[in-house]
C-alpha cells in the first residue's frame, strides 16, 4: 500500500479522495441492496408471515408516534397561520393551508423522519447484530439469501405501511388544526371544514402518499444496508444505527425536494 | 478408519472438495497464502493451528461465504469461484455448517432455529418438522429444549443447538468452526461421537477446525497443520502425532516456537 502523506495539500487531497471513495462506496451499497431487494421480491418462497410481522412493526407500532407528531403539527400550523392570516383578514383560509401543507408535504415527510428514527435504526441494529454474530453467514450457509429473508420483508413492509401512516397523519393533523381554529379562535366549524376541503384535490393526497412510499423505501434500504455491512463488533453496530438514522433523514429531505419537483 | 486414509495427500475416492492455490488478503494483511488441499468423499479432515493462522477464513471459503483473491474451490465438480450465485446457493443445501458461537437466530426459539432449514428447503408438514427437530436435538443430547430461547442457553448448549441445526437437512458435507471450544470433556466426546456417527451412517464428508487435539484424534482421517495462511503438514493422526516437523512438535507439546515468541 502506498504511504500516506502526513502534511500539506497532498494530505488534504488524500483525505478528500478517501472521503469521496467512501461516499461512492456507500451509495453503491445502497443501490445494491435496493436493486437486489426488488429482484428478490419476486422469488419464491414468499414469506407472508414475516412480511406481516414487519408490517406490524413498521406500521401498527408507529401509529402512536405518527399520531402525536401530526396532531401537534396540525395544531401548531393552525396556531401560526391564524395569527399571521389575521393581519390581512384571511383567517378563513387557515383550514385550506393546514390541509394542503399536511397532505402535500408535512405528513409524509414527518412520518418518514419519525419512522426512520423508530424503525430504520432498529433495522440497522438488528441486521448489524446478526452480521457480527455470524447469523447472516449462517443464513448463507443454510442456502438462504439474507437479502431475500431479511431485507425484502422489511423494505416491502415499509413501502406499504408509510402511505397508510401518512393517511392517518393527514387526518389527525387536519383534526388538530380544526381543534385549534374552532376551540381556541372560535372559528365557525362548518366554514372551517368547508374551506379545508374546498381547495383540496385528490392529487394533493395521492402525491403525498407516493412520496411516503418512496420514503419508506429509502429509510428501510438505508437501515438494512447500514446493518448488512456492519463491521467491528458492538461498536460497529452502534455506529451503523446512528448513521442509519442520520443518513435516512438526509436522503428523505433531499429526495423530498426532487420528488416534489417531479410530482407537482 | 478407511484404508485410503493411510495415504496422505491422496483423497480416498476422488475429492469432494478441492482447493487450488487459495490466496486471500484483507487490506494489507495476507490471511491465506496459497493453499492446496483435497478432501475425499466421506473423509474427515481436521485443521489445527494457532489463533490467526487463517483457519476460520479458510473454512468460510469452502462454502462460498468469502470469495478468494486468487485460486479456486471446487465442490463435487462445481467451482464456487466461477459458478453463478444460484448454483452456489443450491450447492449450499448439501452443506451443514456449525459456527464458532453457534450463530443461532436470537429472536427465534430453539425449535424455530432447527426447523428453519427444514421449512425452507424440505417440508412444511408440522409433524415431520417436529419429528426431525426432536431427532436432531437427541443427537446432540439436548432433548426437550425446543421452547427455550437461545439467550436462556449456556454457551456450550448454544453450540450444540447450532450443530443440531447444521445436520437438520442431513447434509453431505459438514463444516465445523471450533465445535468444542469451551465445552466440557463429556460434551466434547459426545460431539466427536455424533460426527463419527454421521460419517458412518450417511458417509458425510467433514472439515473441522479446532485447537482440541483430543477431538482431532477422535474424528480425523487426516490432520492438517495451518500456519500463517499455509498448510504446513498433513498426515494421518498417528503420523501427525509422530511428526518431526518442528512447528507440529511445538504445537503438540504446547510450546511457543522460537519464531513466534514476542
Image (cartoon, coloured by chain):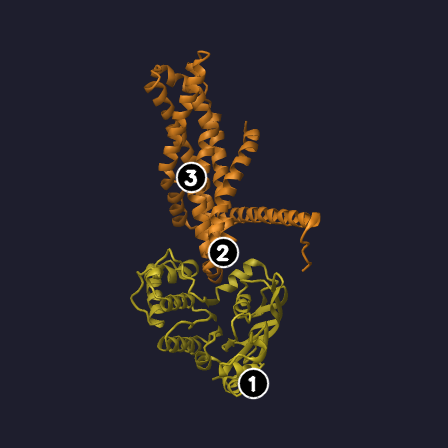
Q: Are marks 1 and 2 on the same chain?
A: no
In this rendered view, identify the residue nearer to me: B147 or A49: B147
Q: CA distance from mark 3 to mark 2?
A: 24 Å
Q: Residue furthest front?
A: A7
Q: Which residue is mark 3?
A: A161
Position of the N terminus of chain A, as image quadrant, is: bottom right
**Could you tell me residue B134's position as x and y percent?**
33, 67
Subunit of mark 2? A
Q: Which residue is mark 2?
A: A145
Q: Residues within 10 Å of mark 1 (few under 14, many from 20)?
A: few
Height in image: B216 above or below B103? below
Height in image: B151 above or below B252? above
Q: In percent of the image, x 43 and y 38: which residue is there? A: A114
In this rendered view, identify the residue nearer to me: B6 or B224: B224
Q: Where, by quadrant of the figure, is residue A190 drawn?
A: top left
Q: Are marks 1 and 3 on the same chain?
A: no
Subunit of mark 1? B
Marks 1 and 3 close (CB-CB < 8 Å): no
Q: Which chain is orange?
A: A
Q: Residue furthest left?
A: B144
Q: CA distance from mark 1 to mark 3?
A: 63 Å
> In the rendered image of this protein, which colour is used for chain B?
yellow
In this rendered view, identify the residue nearer to me: A241 or B112: A241
Amino acid at each position: 500500500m502506498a504511504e500516506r502523506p502526513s502534511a500539506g495539500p497532498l494530505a488534504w487531497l488524500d483525505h478528500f479522495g478517501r472521503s469521496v471513495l467512501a461516499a461512492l462506496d456507500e451509495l453503491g451499497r445502497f443501490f445494491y441492496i435496493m436493486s437486489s431487494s426488488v429482484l428478490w421480491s419476486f422469488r419464491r418462497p414468499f414469506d407472508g408471515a414475516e412480511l406481516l410481522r414487519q408490517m406490524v412493526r413498521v406500521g401498527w407500532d408507529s401509529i402512536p408516534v405518527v399520531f402525536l407528531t401530526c396532531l401537534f403539527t396540525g395544531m401548531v400550523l393552525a396556531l401560526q397561520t391564524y395569527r399571521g392570516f389575521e393581519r390581512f383578514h384571511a383567517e378563513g383560509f387557515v383550514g385550506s393551508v393546514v390541509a394542503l401543507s399536511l397532505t402535500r408535504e408535512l405528513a409524509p415527510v414527518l412520518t418518514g423522519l419519525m419512522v426512520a428514527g423508530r424503525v430504520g435504526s432498529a433495522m440497522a441494529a438488528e441486521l448489524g447484530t446478526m452480521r457480527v454474530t455470524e447469523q447472516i453467514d449462517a443464513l448463507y450457509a443454510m442456502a438462504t439469501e439474507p437479502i431475500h429473508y431479511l431485507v425484502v420483508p422489511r423494505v416491502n413492509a415499509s413501502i406499504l405501511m408509510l402511505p397508510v401512516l401518512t393517511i392517518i397523519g393527514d387526518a389527525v393533523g387536519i383534526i388538530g388544526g380544526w381543534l385549534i381554529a374552532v376551540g381556541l379562535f372560535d372559528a365557525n366549524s362548518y366554514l372551517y371544514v368547508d374551506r379545508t376541503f374546498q381547495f383540496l384535490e385528490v392529487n394533493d393526497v395521492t402525491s403525498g402518499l407516493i412520496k411516503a412510499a418512496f420514503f419508506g423505501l429509502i429509510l428501510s434500504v438505508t437501515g438494512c444496508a447500514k446493518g448488512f455491512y456492519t463491521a467491528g463488533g458492538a461498536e460497529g453496530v452502534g455506529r451503523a444505527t446512528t448513521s442509519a438514522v442520520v443518513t435516512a433523514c438526509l436522503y428523505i429531505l433531499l429526495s423530498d425536494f426532487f420528488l416534489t419537483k417531479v410530482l407537482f | 478408519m478407511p484404508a485410503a486414509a493411510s495415504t496422505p495427500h491422496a483423497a480416498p475416492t476422488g475429492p469432494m472438495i478441492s482447493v487450488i492455490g487459495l490466496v486471500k488478503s484483507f487490506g494489507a494483511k495476507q490471511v491465506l497464502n496459497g493453499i492446496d488441499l483435497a478432501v475425499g468423499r466421506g473423509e474427515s479432515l481436521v485443521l489445527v493451528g494457532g489463533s490467526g493462522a487463517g483457519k476460520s477464513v479458510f473454512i468460510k471459503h469452502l462454502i462460498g461465504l468469502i470469495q478468494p483473491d486468487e485460486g479456486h474451490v471446487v465442490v463435487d465438480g462445481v467451482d464456487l469461484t466461477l459458478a453463478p450465485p444460484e448454483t452456489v446457493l443450491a450447492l449450499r443445501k448439501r452443506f451443514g455448517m456449525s459456527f464458532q458461537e453457534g450463530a443461532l437466530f436470537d429472536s427465534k426459539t430453539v425449535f424455530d432455529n432447527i426447523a428453519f432449514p427444514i421449512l425452507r428447503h424440505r417440508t412444511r408438514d408440522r409433524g415431520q418438522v417436529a419429528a426431525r427437530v426432536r431427532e436432531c436435538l437427541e443427537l446432540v443430547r439436548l432433548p426437550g429444549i425446543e421452547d427455550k430461547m437461545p439467550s436462556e442457553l449456556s454457551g456450550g448448549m448454544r453450540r450444540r443447538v447450532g450443530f443440531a441445526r447444521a445436520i437438520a437437512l442431513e447434509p453431505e458435507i459438514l463444516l465445523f468452526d471450533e465445535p468444542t471450544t469451551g465445552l466440557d470433556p463429556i460434551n466434547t466426546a459426545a460431539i466427536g461421537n455424533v460426527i463419527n456417527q454421521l460419517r458412518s451412517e450417511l458417509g458425510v464428508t467433514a472439515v473441522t477446525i479446532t485447537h482440541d487435539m483430543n477431538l482431532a484424534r477422535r474424528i480425523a482421517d487426516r490432520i492438517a497443520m495451518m500456519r500463517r495462511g499455509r498448510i504446513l503438514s498433513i498426515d494421518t493422526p498417528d503420523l501427525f502425532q509422530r511428526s518431526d516437523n518442528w512447528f507440529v512438535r511445538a504445537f503438540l507439546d504446547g510450546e511457543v516456537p522460537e519464531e513466534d515468541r514476542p
